[in-house]
Image (spheres, helix red, strand yellow):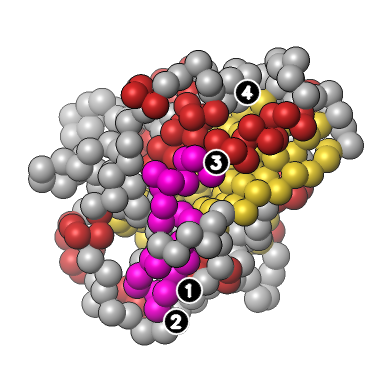
Amino acid sequence: MAITIYTPLLLFFPNTESTSKLEICEHLTESLAKTLTHFYPLAGRIKGNTVVECNDDGAEFFKAQVSCSLSDFLENPAVEILEQFLPAEILSKEAGSGPLLLVQVSLFECGGMALGFSISHKIADASTLSIFINWWAQITNTSITDSEVTLPEFGSASLFPPLEKSSDSSQPPARVYSKNHINITRRFVFDGANISALQSKVANSSVPKPTRVEPISALIWKCAIEASTSKSGSQRPSVFSQYVNLRKRVVPPLPENCAGNVVETIFGSDEAWQGIKDKYKNLKKSDDMEFYSCTSWCRFLFYEADFGWGKPNWVSIASVSIENIIVMLDKRDGNGIEVWLTMNQETMALFESNAELLAYATVNPSVT
């Protein structure tokens, strides 16, 4: 199983519905209960760090009021307060023993709303969260019948059985918790045109058609190394790892509706991994090596979730106080990418002023 954290996700919806928010919340709770009959592990609890006991203890649902309009908030999205829209703290230990799914509906003064999700990363990855959200949206949207909904499949555990691990192995690895400095999260937005320019710049005979994620990852890593070097006065060796969705990469491929935690860390090359795998655990405890971990949630259908009042106008995460974590999400237009990066405060000040970075990315712009 993965580390003990709640994976966060936020969907923001404008006010396009004449139905009262009380009725919408009641409808959401009813449809959530119906959805959980098909995603029954999310209503269970983890036992012994390797088993999900499907005991129907249930998910948790909360309501909150926001004392501003959604448009005002999106004009100047305050990254540091986004966690208030979530029903659970991201680093809560409850992710390993308590509810596996929590949902919070936050109602803005204008009638807009935010749906905040906290799902235990020990049993679900971003793909599973996307499957769940769209399934719930389809059940909530009364114009869609059950026959139009693809049911989830829970077969990944038979392909990737849990390993016996020490009692502390489910905790985040060394150096993710900041003891001597403050970690902060920043949002960097790359529009489609700038991504195309980056792709053209890095394309070569070895990688003639780089993906959107590849040149952005390379630029982030390069600028991070420069910021770290400037801060410490010398360049330290570093490792950049990319988490990938294995569903299409195993043979035979797994179905897209395969639910669970089906991700793995990929290093720069197989040789790179073979060369450090025996030393990896000890290296993560060493100050001589810097680790950057990146996950891309691009192409997941979060922006397609229509609960009956339209699709979200913004999808985001929240501040994650795990050092050197990078999360990428699509912009609403499907061409641009939002990069959410957490670093220690001193390094971030240097990183976010990097001229090469700012030639391609904008720091926390308004949501349009």
Count residues near mark 1 (Cα–Cα under 10 Å), then give few for <14, some for 14-19, many for 20+: some
Q: Is there CB contact under 8 Å for labels 2 and 4?
A: no
Question: What residue would you read off at disc 3?
Answer: 32
Q: CA distance from mark 3 to mark 4?
A: 22 Å
Is 54 drawn above or below residue 134 in the view shown? below
Q: Earlier in the sequence, mark 1 or mark 3?
A: 3
**Measuring 25% from the left and 54% from the top, which residue is drawn there?**
156
Magenta-drawn segment: 32-53
Between 310 and 334, which is closer to the camera in this rendering?
310
Q: Is there CB contact under 8 Å for labels 1 and 2?
A: yes
Question: What residue would you read off at disc 1?
Answer: 171
Q: Is there CB contact under 8 Å for labels 2 and 3?
A: no
Between 287 and 118, which is closer to the camera in this rendering?
118
Q: Earlier in the sequence, mark 2 or mark 4?
A: 2
- The kind of residue on which mark 3 rests is Leu
Q: Secondary structure at mark 3?
A: helix
Position in image of residue 11 (x %, y %):
61, 34
Question: What residue would you read off at disc 2?
Answer: 168
Residue 313 got which mark? 4
Is 161 drawn above or below residue 59 in the view shown? below
Q: Secondary structure at mark 1?
A: loop
Count residues near mark 3 (Cα–Cα under 10 Å), then give few for <14, some for 14-19, many for 20+: many
Q: Secondary structure at mark 4?
A: loop
